[in-house]
Image (cartoon, rainbow, N blue to C red):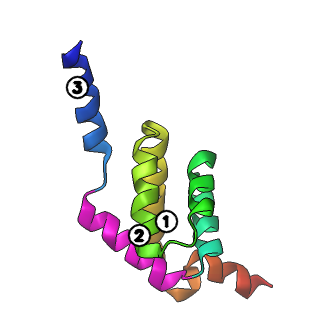
Amino acid sequence: MCGGSSIAQEGLDRMRLPQDIANLLALCLRNLIWYKDKIIAFLKECDVPESVLLFAKRNKNIPTLQLVPMVLEELYTKGDDGYKAAKRMLTKIYYWKDIHTVYPLKEKTRQ
């Protein structure tokens, strides 16, 4: 029984973003998106599970550089769904070409 438990934990550890990447993700979101409501909208667009979105909303008074790693920790507890959301976050940021392709700013330019 203990063997299966360690295998499951090993699988979760492999799905974890390295800490340096998580820190850079937090820094990127803080520097480019800035406002918490827009960061939460970004998380929602990345299909972050509703329970994790609620966690982020409840803790939006925490600085972004601390909140994003906390959100990632919550995502790790969601297994495959959490991993997919974290991966979507990184992929979305990867495809930002310039300041005009950053999520919240796109909507402003359309109005």
> CA separation, marks 1 and 2?
21 Å
Disc 1 versus disc 2: nearer the observer? 2
Q: Is residue 49 visible?
A: no
User: Does residue 6 sit above or below 92 in this rendering?
Assistant: above
Residue kind at label 1, given as amino acid type: Lys
> CA separation, marks 1 and 3?
30 Å
Q: Which residue is mark 1?
A: 92
Disc 1 versus disc 3: nearer the observer? 3
Q: Position of residue 50 (x, y in %)?
A: 63, 48
Q: Is residue 22 within the magenta segment?
A: yes
Q: Which residues are magenta?
A: 18-34
Q: Which residue is mark 3?
A: 7
Q: Which residue is mark 2?
A: 66
Q: Position of residue 37 (x, y in %)?
A: 65, 73
- Give the residue at x 47% y 39%: 78
On the rendered image, what quadrant is the C terminus found in? bottom right
